[in-house]
Amino acid sequence: MNPLNTIFDAKRLIGRRFRDNNLQNDTDVRPFKVINTIDPGKTDQPMISVNYLGKEKKFTPEEISAMTLAKMKAVAEAFTGSIVNHAVISVPAFFNDSQRRATKHAGFIAGFNVVHIINEPTATAMAYYDLEMKMNRINKNPKIVLVFDLGGGTFDVSLVVIEKARITVKAVSGDTHLGGADFDNRMVRGFVMEFEQKHKKDISKNAGALARLRVASEKAKRVLSLLPQADVQIDCLFEDIDFNSTITRASFEHLNMDLFEKCIDIVEQCLSYAGVNKLAVHDIVLVGGSSRIPKVQQMVQEFFNGKELCKHVHADEAVAFGAAMHAFSKSNGTITNKDIVLSDVTPLPLGVELIYGKMDFIIPMNEPIPIKFRHRSYPLAEDSYNGFKFGVYEGDQTNVKDNNYLGLCEFFCYHFPRGTTYIHVYFSVDEDGLLSVSAEVKEMGRLSQRIYMNHHGRLTQTEIVRMINEAEHYKAQIEKRRKLLQEKSDLENYVKNISDGLDDEGTIDINDLELERMKQAALDSALQLLERNSDLSEISVLAYKLEELKNIFGDFES
């Protein structure tokens, strides 16, 4: 494994700024390289730098996510035997507008028509609904369900009301940078310190050592969900030094207790947003791989006064199952009894910047979506001779600098006198949770100018098309490399079978000397071809050489 070229947790990069604190805090345990883009107008956008065919190549997080989606597209097409063009893509409920939009772009790059962006806890609620229906446990009475989704990189809590075939999300809360990866990172940092204490060697900058420690830490974390302690043994971790350590479940829990407590705080926050007492919750559904951690389960159960936790929904598959149900419904299919009606909410408040950098909230958090129309009017505070602009933000802080900047509305080249000029701002949010903003200026009640928000950091249509073309190019290159490896493997196996038939002298045991020379020359030529590093241009050469040997030796069996 090449640690510098092995990319993971792209979900924790997508839609973020390069200077994002969460992104920067992982630098010490991230083996691959994340850099700031140098493209004009795209500053503060993270790029992943890798070595591709001997050259540096930079990818956006959207392109990396698109590779995963493209792989799933290929898997689905192989399974169904038909072309798959449409997709429902799940995202963390607490993903902001930038992250949702970037995820949708990743779907486009992968070759999908993205039918819907569904929140992961909402998809889980659909899977839960399906199981409850099969067990005849859905009746006329509303059922309040809390979905606790602690995955590899993100954490979501959703408070959902299920009534007949309607799933209504009342509130969401979460942290898009809290999950199993953070528990792994804590262990990796601890083992780096332990190695330095034992051997006086600093491995914190060695990508290979960090990558191997990460793999070992994740395995240990899984073991600790079943056993009271786990051994970590890595041969030749650094400078031929072996690393051996043991971590107990108690140590793991102590190492991550503040993160576990943060999960409980977020649960409490979600209930508060929904205005629901924890005693009113009928079921607590645990999903996500990290929800299997015994201490997490214990703390959740204690918070709900010992209430039994619902674990019959598959922790790893629930989101995919629910999203598939929703995709089936979207494709004009029918689900048992009736199509399920979904109603989701906005995870964060949305608003505009007022004077002195203050935020005016136009759409509050946990507002049901879609929102077709929200309007706010502002009188112009002073005369404007060169136009004016205002920013659009997402977040719950009163100062816009502490919120997520989404884009800019800018009016040009008009004289707008104060007192008689009003700015009218219109917000709408679609079913995917994506915001659209328009604004207009009216002077003395007459429309002077109308504009639309320019999204900050958003990929342009030209960039998306370029990335789609590049993705097709890389797909073709990967297929060629697969063919190269297959041809080389076939030739190696055939040559091995021939070699196994050689006599003790290392020559072919036949009587015809001329035929012997011809066969030996063909075999030597094949061996020379296998010994060198073949490039993609030699696929046909390898295939030809194998065919040549078969013509000489026949279907040779060892």
Image (cartoon, rainbow, N blue to C red):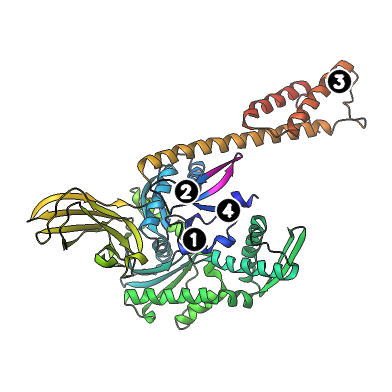
Q: Residue furthest left?
A: 444
Position of residue 67 in the picture relative to residue 384 (left or right): right
Q: Nearer the viewer, mark 3 or mark 4?
A: 4
Instruction: Give the residue type that dot 4 points to.
Output: Phe
Q: Which residue is mark 1?
A: 23
Say which residue label 4 marks. 32
Of helix, strand and loop, which mostly describes the magenta segment? strand
Please give the residue where the numbered disc 3 appears in the rendered image: 516
Front disc: 3 or 2: 2
Against 311, is 437 above or below?
above
Q: Nearer the viewer, residue 21 or 263?
A: 21
Q: What amino acid does circle 1 point to? A: Leu
> Which sits earlier in the primary sequence, circle 4 or circle 2?
4
Between the residue at mark 3 and the residue at mark 2, the CA separation in whole angstroms equals 57 Å
Q: Is residue 39 above or below residue 368?
A: above
Q: Examine the rendered structure and indicate whether residue 359 appears above or below residue 116.
A: below
